Amino acid sequence: MSPAEGTGSTGSVISRHSKGFSYAVAVLVTILWSSSYVFIKLGLEEVPPLYFAAVRYTLAFAILATIDLSAHGSGKKSNEGHTPRASPLVLLVAGIAGYTIAQGFQYVGLFFLPAVTTSFLLNFTPVFVLLIGYVAFSEKPSRLQVYGLVAAIVGAYLFFSDRISWQGEWLGVVVVLASGLGWAAYVVIVRQLQVTRVLSSLRLTTTTMGAGVAGMLVLSAATEGFVPLAFNLVLAVVWLATINTALAFFLWNWVLKTLPSYELTMVQSLMLVEIAIFALVFLQETITASMAVGMALVFAGVLTVQLRSRQTGGSPH
């Protein structure tokens, strides 16, 4: 097929199908990440937070590094030599922001706060993404997408308005907000690296996770020390590392090739609803009327972004 034959209406259909698949993958990742809250809250009853995070992400990094080395040692040609190489400093910043701060601090936040409170605070991450993307990369959302973002944030407030207790929890609040800011910075940086295709999704995920893991290990060793894991926690860590981390982060970084960062963070808002469902099923928590309204607003906000994306032809910018 010639380039001309791949354009026009057929190309638009393929583009829409490709973007729809990317959204499906992104939703799958949010489900995996939402399930992590149950594992983490149970694990934090036995081990300190940074240590728990460090063990999980060290194992995940080892898995990804093994796969990455095998792929590059199999004789396959890489296109990375024909593109500008990513700055080591940029990769280091992305790793520290996305893993040491975003993931490590999230564990600390879950140690101090209930899971629902932590999830509520992390719902403000799209605001950070919009600000960082606009200031650093001029990545401007449409007016309709801003309305969708506002709807999702209002929905998040209604969802958790009758479940949040702030008294005596300020340290946890600050730590979780720092986690959200770190994740926002990571999403924006990785989005730019994926658009310029300086590294493959696998190499990018492995490199940034390695940098973040190093930071986690340093912080954990300095503040918490070594704690042996019980057998049930070993099984939980293996699942979290292989499926909810190595696979999920690889898929998330792959999706960043086709979806802009502010749209992905809107999809990530679905975690509010997903975490509530997990809590209802596994923790026997109830859903109030205000929470149900909040869920509807979150869905409406995400749907608005998706519909707007299709109307504009699926362009990332």
Image (cartoon, helix red, strand yellow):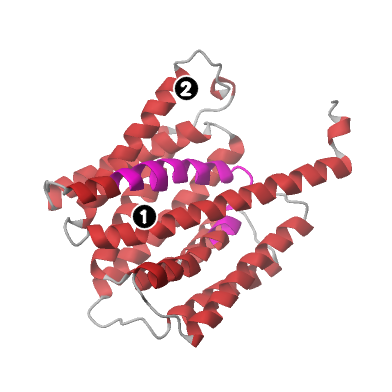
Give the overall secondary structure of the magenta segment.
helix
Mark number, residue 71: 2
Which of the two discs, 1 and 2, labels the residue nearer the N terminus? Answer: 2
Is residue 134 shown left or right of residue 182?
right
Q: Residue at 52% across / 80% down in the picture?
A: 292
262 drawn magenta: yes
Q: Is residue 20 above or below residue 203?
A: below
Q: Is residue 206 left or right of residue 193?
A: left
Q: Nearer the viewer, mark 1 or mark 2?
A: 2
Image coordinates for residue 123, horizontal then vertical, percent? 46, 68
Left-right relation of 215 to 160? left
Q: What kind of element bears circle 1?
A: helix
Of the pair 89 and 63, the residue shown nearer to us = 63
Label 2: which secondary element: helix
Q: Is residue 181 visible?
A: no
Q: Which mark is residue 261?
A: none
Q: Spatial distance from mark 1 to mark 2, Cα to Cα? A: 28 Å
Q: Residue at x 82, y 41 (%)?
A: 11
Residue 53 appears in the figure: yes
Query: Which quarter of the rendered picture does the N terminus lie within?
Result: top right
- Identify the residue shown where x is 28% and y is 63%: 41
Q: Position of residue 16 (x, y in %)?
A: 75, 49
Left or right, 299 with respect to 34, comes to right
Amino acid under label 1?
Ala
Q: Which residues are magenta?
A: 237-265
Task: Check disc 2 and give the amino acid type.
Answer: Ala
- State the residue position of label 1: 102
Looking at the picture, does residue 174 appear above or below residue 166?
above
